[in-house]
Amino acid sequence: MYQNVQEKRSFQRVACRNVVKFKIKDSLESGGCLARDISDGGIKINLNEFVPLHSEVNLEVQLATQRIVDCVARIVWIEKMPFMDRYQAGLEFDNNRLEQDVKIKIHGYTHPRH
């Protein structure tokens, strides 16, 4: 039976395969990964290791060839990918700690002018 499920996201998501560098706050864990999608409010990434919910993460997201933005985000969901030893995680940007120029760059990436 089909159920009408209402979308809860507040921001338009854009599919991507962008390079992301990350550092988990209060941890030695850091590394690189790929983003799966991005919006003004957050980013979905693939990870090789499990990261606990609510962990604070410092990100360097490559939006374009010469455009890298630094963000602070928090893990809001994480799930193991089927048949793999990898995880997908949804991170919400900390808008209170996001520089205005970073917000503008992310918005420009997620809402390109045609």
Image (cartoon, helix red, strand yellow):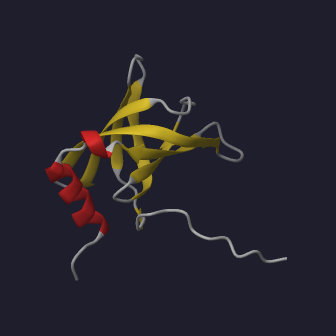
Rendered location of residue 81, percent (x, y): 65, 46
Residue sitting at the far bottom: 114
Specify the quadrant that holds the C terminus. bottom left
Q: Residue at x 40, y 60 (%)?
A: 16
Q: Is residue 67 visible?
A: no
- Res 80 quadrant in image: top right
Quarter that holds the N terminus? bottom right
Residue 14 in the image: state x and y as whole percent: 40, 66
Task: Determine the residue positioned at 39% across, 17% down.
Answer: 26
Does 39 appear above or below 6?
above
Find residue 99 and report its horizontal and vertical position in percent: 18, 45
The residue shown at (71%, 45%) is 83
With respect to residue 96, does 13 lie above or below? below
Residue 20 in the figure: left or right of residue 45? left
- Asked whether, in this view, residue 55 is left or right of residue 62, the answer is right
Percent of width and height locating residue 110: 31, 66
Can residue 108 be seen? yes
Q: Closest to the observer: 95 or 33?
A: 95
Question: Seen from this angle, which residue lies furthest front?
Answer: 96
In this view, the residue in front, 110 or 5, is 5
Q: Relative to the observer, which residue lies in front, 49 or 113?
A: 113
Side of 48 where 104 appears, left or right: left
